[in-house]
Image: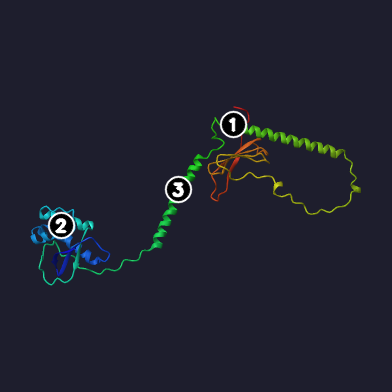
Amino acid sequence: MATELTRYNGYRYVLRRGTSFTDDAKKTNAGRSMLMHADMVIWESNVALVARVELFLRKGFSWYSKNPKPARETLQTLLAYVRDGAVIVLQENGATTNVFENGGFTLDPPARKDGPDPPPFDYYARGAANRASLLEYNAVIDAREERERVANTPSFETVKPSEMPYLLSLVRMVARRENVRREAMQKAASGFSESADKAATKLGEAAPFELGDTPGFGDGFDIAKTPNYGEPGTWYTNPGSKQMRLYGDTGAPVVDFDFDHDHGQGIPHAHNYGPLGADGAFNREGGRSFSLLPW
């Protein structure tokens, strides 16, 4: 349903309910501009114009009140419907005379100008900006997690007093087992030395031999290395060196107890781990001595 609202400046302005994809955007923009520049105080006194608007609203909208109302209320309703998009005003050509109003405007509506087409949407540029923003956001999150990890990483000095008896009991158990193994190896070596001293070997009668290829014993023959990473919050005991290692929240080591060597701090002694280096290398601190005596 369309109703001619007014004629002005050589154009016809038509009211129509709703919008359509086939509408000319330039015509609808021009019609809306005309209406928004109109002087509603002057339009209120135009009985014929107000009657056309009232009839259009009653026919077009079933909920619109059929009761008599002031002209200002009718025009304000029209303005509200246009702002909401329920009604559009189209600027049409073909007005040869100003049969209707030739005034009632605070200023002349702007002339229609054919503006340049908007530039195409640059999806790649928008995507690059979004990717940069995401990288920045992730960097902030990673930095915060690293600060929290460093702040929450336990060390040998920060072991709770309630946990120390259990921890030292583990260390004493491993130390006793290591001492027994060392004493057994020393006894075996001493017995072998005595047997060798008593044996008589005639080297002059020994047959010549050539050194052949050294046989390979496989990976199982090598001394096991303590894993660099483990299950967070767990201990690992090296079956060869008896080294005990505690893994932190990230799975990286935080404390080592060594039993097979002495840095001057005694056997056993402890090593704390600091934050990882920029290249991901472990930062293992110097040895720290501690007592195995019960508290």
In the rendered view, would you say 18 is above or below 146? below
- The alpha-carbon separation of the residues under discs 2 and 3 comes to 59 Å
As drawn, the label of residue 55 is none
Are circles 2 and 3 on residues that touch, CB within 8 Å?
A: no
Residue mark closest to the camera, 2 vs 3: 2
Instruction: Mark 3 or mark 1: name the one nearer the start of the chain.
Output: 3
The residue where tag 3 is placed is 141
Q: Is residue 127 above or below residue 248?
A: below
Q: Position of residue 235 (x, y in %)?
A: 59, 39
Q: Which quadrant does the N terminus fall into? A: bottom left
Marked residue nearer the N-terminal end (1 or 2): 2
> Helix, strand, or loop for circle 1?
helix
**Circle 3: residue type:** Ile
Rendered residue at 68%/32% (across/down): 176
Q: Is residue 142 left or right of residue 38?
A: right
The reply to whether the C-beta atoms of the residues labelled 1 and 2 are less than 8 Å apart is: no
Q: Is residue 2 left or right of residue 229?
A: left
- Secondary structure beneath dot 3 equals helix
Q: Which callout, 2 or 3, points at the residue further toward the start of the chain?
A: 2
Taking the spot 63% from the left edge, 36% from the top edge, the residue there is 269
Q: Residue at x 63, y 34 (%)?
A: 171
The numbered dot on residue 58 is: 2
Rendered image quadrant of residue 178: top right
Quarter of image, res 114: bottom left
**Amino acid type indicated by mark 2:** Arg
In space, the residues marked 1 and 2 are separated at their CA atoms by 88 Å
